[in-house]
Image (spheres, grey):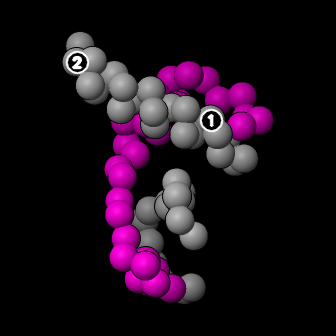
Amino acid sequence: MMSSAERKIFNDKMLFLRSLPEFKHLSLPRSKLVHLCANLQPMSCIKNKVIFREGDRNDNVYFVRSGE
């Protein structure tokens, strides 16, 4: 069972995913969105820091919540 703070974080993640154009019109089952939310990890970056370069091997997907 989630605490109220954990539920708020989960709900914020769910709203964020549903706000993305990539997910807005998909009819994913709720269980898939729950799985995605459980695996979302927030990350802060320094301005102009390179996260990865074209051609780099990467096992992650990045969604920008704020900034550029």
Residue type at mark 2: give it. Ser
Query: Is 48 displayed left or right of 44 in the figure?
Result: right
The residue identified by callout 1 is 18
Q: Where 15 sits versus 45, above or below?
A: above
Which residue is rendered at x = 71% and y = 37% of the image? 24
Q: Where 14 sits versus 4, above or below?
A: below
Is 34 covered by the magenta stretch? yes
Q: Where 35 sits versus 39, above or below?
A: above
Residue 54, percent across and down? Answer: 56, 85
Residue 23, percent across and down? Answer: 67, 41
Span colored in magenta:
24-53
Q: Quadrant of residue 37?
A: top left
In whole angstroms, how far apart are the C-alphas of marks 1 and 2? 22 Å
Q: Callout 2: 10 Å neighbours few (<14), some, many (20+)?
A: few
Q: Where 10 sits versus 41, above or below?
A: above
Of residues 44 and 14, the one nearer the viewer is 44
Query: Is 11 displayed left or right of 18 in the figure?
Result: left
Magenta-drawn stretch, dominant element (helix, strand or loop): loop
Which part of the image, by quadrant, shows the C terminus?
A: bottom right
Task: State the SS at label 2.
Answer: loop
Which residue is rendered at x = 61% and y = 23% of the image? 29
The residue identified by callout 2 is 3
Residue type at mark 1: give it. Arg
Residue 47, percent across and down? Answer: 43, 79
Residue 57, percent across and down? Answer: 45, 78
Q: Quadrant of residue 38?
A: top left
Which part of the image, by quadrant, shows the N terminus?
A: top left
Query: Is 41 displayed left or right of 33 in the figure?
Result: left
Q: Quadrant of residue 9?
A: top left
Task: State the SS at label 1.
Answer: helix
